[in-house]
Image: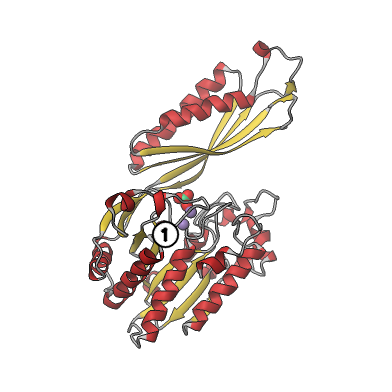
Amino acid sequence: MLFELAAISAEPERLVRLYLSPEYRRAADLVSLWMRETGLEVFEDALGNVRGRMGAAPRLLIASHIETVIDAGRYDGTMGVVAAILAYDTLVRANAKPAFGIELIAFGDEEASRFPTTLSTSAALAGHFEPKTLALKDSAGVTYAEALRAYGKNPDEVASVALKPHEASAYVELHIEQGPVLEAKNEPLGVVTAMIGQTRLMIEVKGEAGHAGTVPMNLRRDALAGAAEMTIAAEKTGHEGLVATVGTIEARPGAVNIIPGLVRFTLDLRTASDEARKKAIAAYRHECEKIAAKRKLDVAVTVTHEIPTTPCDARLQDQLAAAIEAVGGKPIRLPSGAAHDGMSMAKLCPIAMLFVRCKRGVSHNPAEYASPGDMGLAIAALVRFIERFEKP
Ligand code: GLV
Ligand code: MN
Ligand code: MN
């Protein structure tokens, strides 16, 4: 199933499956089919999330995402969706369908790879979709609302995606760890304690475009050289427990013989303490202003995304740990440095996450790998978790 999904890509040489793209359509159809084959009642909501239901509300929600980053691996997101289907199917085949309701969900916007937003499809489910998201544009200038219409959806119906708190008993997600902890401890499965908060910035640096051959070095206002210094300043912000990444940079007008007059770059900064993150952002903003002043540049720093550290429910963590022990594992408790849809779902109901060891902790990279044995054990643990599930 993972290989079938991985073959659905916009490009032949690498996996690219952006939210609301034709490839996303094909993946959503395949996942709908798989869900339907287990006997679930399947529908697609107004944001293109695929949802398969059984029984009455409140339901236990089990989910992950099916869109990917650019040049993705096969496991991030899709493994959680496939595992949920296989776990539910195992129960159906064993004639052990739970007495409570279940809803499996394949989300569409977790990776922030198409629009400058993230977790918007799960935010909508939790009833917290921000209407301004609809005006955000992808790199081709297509707005989120236009992409929805092209996908056959009506942006005016976003509110219909939401569940009410009494309709969800809990949210659980299975995911590759995307870090090296489980491998180092030689354990296949872990229980997530919390998801680390993050702030994303867009930094715009304005200088003056000019001729690369005629403007003397001391008279330049080179926006890219300034942004380079700000990038190094961002790297210096990082330390044990705080990570800072400049992931995109764009220089205008972007020609070999023109001094860049305008640069935009992004910073993604994460740390468990929300207070420490706020302080680090304030200090970084100050540093950018100092660099800009020294180089006679203008700089504008805008927060594009901010999400606090989100703890997982203690009782659900214990239920997951017990399920891991029941299948012969030793549950390692660990925080997640990656963001997940659970961060938005926590606004609706108690959440939990089960992590699966992945090779060298590599993710957001085609080399991503989780072994069939580890994934099988994770599914067995998920089956056990569902069997023994008690609403917290
Ligand atoms: C999602 O993968 C994120 O943590 O950025
Ligand atoms: Mn993911
Ligand atoms: Mn990811």
Q: Residue at x 23, y 64 (%)?
A: 318
Within 10 Å of disc 1 (Cα), the crowding (few <14, some 14-19, many 20+) is many
Disc 1 on helix, strand or loop?
Answer: loop
The quarter of the rendered structure image containing the C terminus is bottom left
Q: Which residue is mark 1?
A: 370
Q: Amino acid at mark 1?
A: Ala
Residue pushed farthest bottom? 95
Some atom of ligand 2 lies within 8 Å of the CB belonging to the residue at label 1: no
Relative depth, front residue between 122 and 339: 339
- In the image, is 179 to the left or to the right of 220? left
Q: How many marks?
A: 1
- In the image, is 268 to the left or to the right of 386? right
Q: In the image, is residue 108 above or below residue 380? A: above
Residue 126 at what x, y percent from top left? 44, 64
Relative depth, front residue between 333 and 327: 327
Can residue 137 be seen in this snapshot? yes
Residue 339 at what x, y percent from top left? 43, 52
Residue 283 at what x, y percent from top left? 42, 28
Residue 103 at what x, y percent from top left? 43, 75
Q: In the image, is residue 247 above or below residue 256? A: below
Q: Residue at x 65, y 51 (%)?
A: 138
Give the quadrant of residue 320: bottom left
Give the quadrant of residue 224: top right
Relative depth, front residue between 108 and 67: 67
Q: How was the colour assigned to the protein in this rendering?
A: secondary structure
Can residue 126 be seen in this snapshot? no
